[in-house]
Image (cartoon, helix red, strand yellow):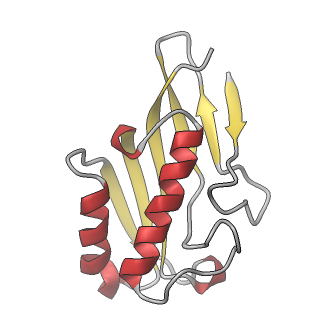
Amino acid sequence: MIKSTQTDKAPAAIGPYSQAIVVESVAPLGMVFTSGQIPLDPQTMALVGDDIRTQTTQVLNNLRVVLESAGSSLQSVVRTTVYLADMADFAAMNEVYAEAFHPARPARSTIQAARLPRDVRVEIDAVAIVERID
């Protein structure tokens, strides 16, 4: 079964997509696939910060609440994709990212994008394990 999940604790989708999709299975575990999260304040939908550390922190907070709304967590993430506007921000982003995913270290790809939504510096999506929802 595939189910969309939405939380008002993270920024609302700004296009035709879900914050996350949960894939339930007959086994005890399912999967959740999140949409990319950008550094928007979920209440005001305003951009948070102009430096990569502040933006990465907000992105990971948004990702955390989307995962929690789906019955998962940052510790259950198995894969992420990080999109950076500038690879020069990689080291600083990586420091914030490492704190959020300690001790679990999901598989990851990091890509420099020519341009990200609302001209943000970072966007992150994730795939995580979720306990089956009955």
Quadrant in which residue 39 is drawn: bottom right
| Residue in the image at 67% along x and 21% along y | 1
| Residue in the image at 48% along x and 11% along y | 27
Residue 114: x and y in percent read 53, 83
Residue 71: x and y in percent read 53, 33
**Res. 134 in view:** yes
Question: Is 55 on the left-hand or right-hand side of 16?
Answer: left
| Tally of numbered tags | 0
Quadrant in which residue 11 is drawn: bottom right
Nearer-the-camera pick, 89 or 55 = 55
Residue furthest to the right: 16
Residue 60: x and y in percent read 44, 61
Residue furthest to the left: 103
Can you say which quadrant of the picture contains the C terminus? top right
**Res. 112 in view:** no
**82 lies above or below 9:** below
Residue 123: x and y in percent read 50, 69
**121 lies above or below 125:** below
**124 lies above or below 6:** below
| Residue in the image at 58% along x and 37% along y | 70
